[in-house]
Image (cartoon, rainbow, N blue to C red):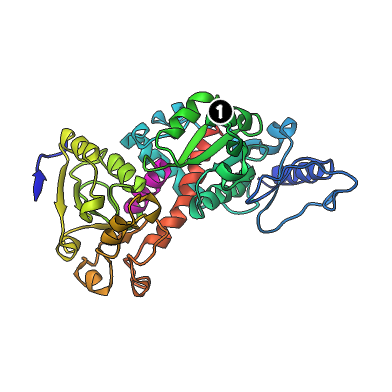
Amino acid sequence: MMMSTMRSTPAAATATRASACRSRSRSGCVRVLNGATAVRRSSSTDPFAGRATRGAGVHLLSCRRHRSSARGEACRATKYASKLSDLTSCVEAEQFDRAMMEELFDVADEMSRVKPGSPESLMLQGYLMSTLFYEPSTRTRLSFEAAMGRLGGGIVSTESAGEYSSAAKGETLEDTMRTVEGYADIIVLRHFTAGSAKRAAAAIGKPLINAGDGPGQHPTQALLDVYTIRKEIGRLDDVKIALVGDLANGRTVRSLATSLTQFNNVKFYFVAPDVVKMKDDIKDMLTAKGIEWEEATDLMAVAADVDVLYQTRIQKERFANPADYEAARGKYIIDREVMAALPRTSVVMHPLPRVDEITVDVDDDPRAGYFRQAQNGLFIRMALLKVLLKV
């Protein structure tokens, strides 16, 4: 059914930094283990005291009093042509206009070329990032932590914050944020409640990045998705995109739809089971902006007509009624038959994790872009950290 058809409107400096880092490690600075908040000071009983440890999930963090000398020339504040210079937090997709996204994508391209041991890989040395996750995450949390680590920064991290933090004792989100703000220079928050990122950002004076707030928004996913579309098909105007699967609960598709309104002549197809159709607020927003969209039920027909086929998982954890989940799951699956209908220049994307909505025999198809999409998340998040920390 067609709902709307309106037109859219150098070497010495590196050695100095390395020496300073070794000195600070021996003198007893903060050590953080990935995956759990484990901040401690070296002492005579510390088995790690006096030696720099490298390994999976271990980060040696710099003392802040040495910050300016540690970062050096690679960390001079960048001036941006767009409003990126004014960005203080990343809370929702609406914060980014076209010029900001395009400039951020250029920074992400630069981040993809950062080599270990280069001056650029130390630009965030001395900074601390806290990842505070109240919901499970693999890709998002690890990509943020990898992004900070690749730029020389340190991490204080906790997963399952709702269960293992003071929230279990009744502490408010605002009090938790004000406390964590005293430990870190930037906070990455994932929460189960829509709107929580806005509340958290309003409570603190440090930069905050929304890593997903329940069924609300996931702005960094939207940014990496738009970045992936640009890299995969070479343009962001004149794009036909199908959003498939759980469109009612999927914060990724909601944020992506919002971000793509910044570009010209984009058409959306919404392909979803009845119980998880795209909500009216997104459809009304698209209509108000003059963006063409259509609800469809024939995945094969839609696949033959799109540049981007964006599949999502039916999110079992969002269903109060198990019967509704069973009615939705397995209805739209991308398999070799669907891929045969998809144009050769198109791309299949998925925010991951997948369950069974894309069959594994599709993975070898060059149009299967979802693992490249996940890697792009690293570069976008490196870029965002650089921008928000003003280096």
Name the residue furthest right: 44
Q: What residue lies at 33% left-to-right and 67% top-to-bottom?
A: 358
For badge 1, the amino acid type reads Lys
Seen in the picture, residue 186 relative to 341 is either above or below; the reply is above
Q: Residue at x 43, y 38 (%)?
A: 193
Residue 289 picture location, percent across and down: 18, 34
320 vs 138, nearest the viewer: 320
Q: Is residue 249 shown left or right of residue 198? A: left
User: Where in the figure is residue 160, as x and y percent of width and height?
Assistant: 56, 47
Q: Is residue 386 left or right of residue 306?
A: right
Q: How many marks?
A: 1
Quarter of the image where one finds residue 104: top left
Residue closest to the eye, 102 or 90: 90
Q: Is residue 4 left or right of residue 239?
A: left
Instruction: Report the residue marked by disc 1.
Output: 206
Is 221 situated above or below 307?
above
Q: Quadrant of residue 100?
A: top left
Q: Residue at x 32, y 45 (%)?
A: 256
Q: Is residue 96 above or below residue 141?
A: above
> Visible in this render: residue 71?
yes
Residue 264 sits inside the magenta stretch:
no
* Residue range corresponding to the magenta coloring: 218-230
Query: Could you tell me what secondary structure mostly forms the magenta stretch?
Result: helix
Magenta segment includes 225: yes
The residue tagged with tag 1: helix, strand or loop? loop
Q: Mark 1, residues whose alpha carbon is within 10 Å: few (<14), some, or many (≥20)? A: some
Relative placement, left or right, of 300 versus 369 is left
- For the C terminus, the image quarter is top right
Q: Nearer the viewer, residue 91 or 231?
A: 91
- Residue 88, compared with residue 302, is above or below; it is above
Visible residue check, residue 88? no
Q: How far across and how far down the image is residue 24, in percent?
A: 79, 41
